[in-house]
């Protein structure tokens, strides 16, 4: 481990220990937060007993579907939009405002349209994620050197071929940034929707545990969601670094 | 009117008309139970804005948002300048901030509720939580990219750290910092509203959440419209200022 990595690990360890100390000494009372080691033990119990497996599976599956939809439609949308400058100029203010609007307000609309199943939650996750993918992919496509496009045209490639073999691979690091946002957003969308109204899933279980003062369920589930999103994000960041490293950047 | 201004006005008009048409079409497909048509919503919104009760919610939200934005910007800038300036601290802390940025913060709302209780402080905390990290991350990158010669000149003149920030770094980095503030604005707004949806008994987010619970379609649409118009108006202004600052730089 490098010196900086070591400092970082020490800092995180110190923060956890501080939290542990505050909890054990009673500065943070038990009803507010159990000590970190307790949360970890509770998480192990939950995972071993499998009592929350259905909820965990449901949420992660829905978030993955939302992510996949956002990714595919977002990239296709961005490629289609990239060639149309005027359409893009018109939509740009919408993109800039999009993330300040509470998309959750559309959840009831989706429930009426799709019924109270998994579909509206996936819909919210998709709606939150797709614009991040579009914006970042467009940003990447803008940075494709013109010489590559010209070469592709000289090779007489079609529109789809150019996108698949030239421009998208070249824009990959930026698309990946979009994917990182979309991972977080699809989780936010699905879990938030479950908080508001649903019949299962981690968000539902967390809010159920919250209303019942069941910290032994609530904190481990929150920790699990945080751990999953941080792990995915770290993996994607590493991949991004590899992609950039190959170009000598 | 210059050609550019005319174009952006035309673009905005096309976007607004397009959204209204899409809205009307969606109404035709989905029907009364899912959403209200544009004209009826506008009328309802006008009536709503005139009521005393609504203005109470509005001013409550505005105060919460103002407080959250102040906290987010002030602490974001402070953290950003510090980490950007201290190379070691920056390298140690930046990945931690990036990881924190990527987590679905919505899952933390029960913890904030337990820590702050139901009310103003919980939603301000929730809003600030969303805004601090993006502002800090932007500021770190900005400070790092300030031309070394400016900093060296400052050192030669024997500036103290506070003077260095005020006289050299801040003016040099203003355009980029402003971009960070623009992003921070959107995220703090959505954070505050989410906080109100889950952790408050007053404010627009609370109103929205009650409307969702009662399935009051007109109220949902009206609140969403107000939030959308507000976010769009402010972010267009910020975007315009942002462009001007970058053009002058």
Image (spheres, rainbow, N blue to C red):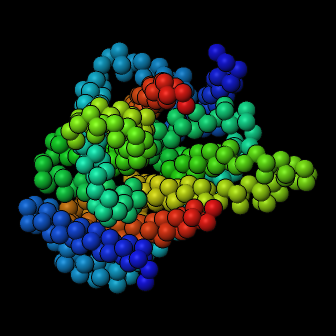
Name the spot of residue B214 as percent of width and height, x first.
22, 62
Q: Quadrant of residue A198?
A: top left
In this rendering, the answer to whether B134 lies above or below B4 is above
Residue at (56% x, 54% y) in the render = B180
Tell me where residue A82 appears, x and y as whole percent. 31, 51
**Count of picture labels:** 0
Q: Quadrant location of the C terminus of chain A? A: top right
Q: Residue at x 49, y 69 (%)?
A: B240
* Residue farthest toward the front in the current orientation of the protein: A154
Q: Residue at x 64, y 35 (%)?
A: B93
Along the line of sight, which residue is nearer the eye, B213 or A89?
A89
Q: Foreground residue, A100 or A109?
A: A100
Q: Quadrant of the N terminus of chain A?
A: top right
**Relative to residue A241, is residue B240 depicted above or below?**
below
B234, B192: nearer the viewer: B234
- The picture quadrant where one finds residue B43 is bottom left
Left or right, A214 with reference to B147:
left
Question: What residue do we see at 48% from left, 24% from top?
Answer: A246
Seen in the image, is B215 located left or right of residue A104?
Answer: left
Q: Is residue B175 visible?
A: yes
On the image, the x and y values in percent for residue B24 come to 15, 69
Above or below A41: residue A116: below
Relative to B168, residue A51 above or below: above
């Amino acid at each position: 481990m490098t010196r900086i990595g070591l400092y970082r690990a020490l800092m995180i360890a110190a923060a956890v220990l501080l939290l542990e100390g505050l909890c054990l000494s009673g500065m943070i009372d038990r009803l507010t937060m159990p000590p970190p080691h307790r949360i970890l033990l509770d998480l192990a119990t939950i995972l071993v007993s499998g009592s929350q497996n259905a909820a965990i599976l449901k949420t992660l599956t829905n978030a993955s579907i939302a992510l996949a939809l956002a990714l595919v439609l977002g990239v296709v949308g961005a490629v289609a939009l990239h060639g149309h400058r005027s359409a893009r100029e018109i939509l740009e203010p919408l993109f800039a405002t999009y993330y300040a609007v509470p998309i959750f307000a559309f959840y009831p609309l989706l429930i009426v349209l799709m019924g109270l199943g998994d579909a509206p939650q996936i819909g919210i996750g998709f709606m939150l994620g797709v614009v991040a993918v579009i914006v970042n992919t467009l940003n990447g496509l803008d940075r494709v050197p013109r010489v590559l496009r010209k070469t592709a045209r000289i090779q007489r490639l079609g529109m789809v071929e150019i996108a698949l073999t030239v421009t998208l691979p070249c824009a990959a690091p930026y698309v990946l940034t979009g994917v990182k946002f979309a991972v977080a957003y699809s989780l936010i969308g699905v879990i938030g929707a479950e908080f508001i109204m649903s019949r299962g899933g981690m968000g539902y279980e967390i809010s159920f545990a919250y209303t019942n003062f069941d910290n032994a369920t609530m904190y481990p589930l929150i920790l699990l969601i945080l751990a999953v999103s941080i792990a995915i994000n770290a993996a994607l960041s590493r991949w991004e670094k590899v992609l950039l490293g190959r170009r000598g950047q | 009117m210059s050609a550019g201004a005319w174009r952006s006005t035309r673009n905005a008009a096309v976007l607004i008309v397009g959204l209204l048409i899409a809205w009307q079409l969606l109404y035709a497909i989905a029907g009364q139970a899912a959403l209200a048509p544009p004209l009826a919503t506008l009328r309802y919104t006008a009536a709503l804005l005139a009521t005393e009760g609504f203005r109470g919610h509005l001013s409550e939200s505005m105060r919460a948002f103002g407080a959250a934005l102040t906290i987010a910007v002030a602490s974001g800038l402070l953290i950003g300048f510090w980490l950007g300036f201290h190379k070691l601290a920056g390298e140690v802390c930046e990945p931690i901030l990036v990881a924190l940025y990527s987590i679905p913060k919505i899952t933390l709302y029960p913890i904030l509720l337990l820590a702050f209780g139901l009310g103003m402080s919980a939603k301000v905390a929730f809003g600030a939580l969303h805004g601090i990290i993006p502002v800090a991350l932007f500021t770190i990158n900005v400070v790092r990219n300030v031309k070394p010669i400016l900093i060296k000149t400052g050192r030669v003149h024997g500036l103290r750290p506070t003077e260095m920030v005020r006289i050299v770094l801040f003016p040099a980095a203003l355009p980029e910092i402003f971009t960070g503030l623009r992003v921070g604005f959107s995220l703090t707004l959505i954070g505050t509203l989410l906080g109100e949806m889950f952790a408050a008994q007053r404010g627009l987010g609370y109103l929205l959440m009650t409307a969702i619970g009662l399935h009051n379609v007109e109220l949902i649409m009206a609140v969403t419209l107000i939030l959308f118009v507000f976010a769009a108006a402010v972010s267009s202004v910020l975007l315009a200022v942002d462009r001007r600052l970058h053009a002058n730089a």
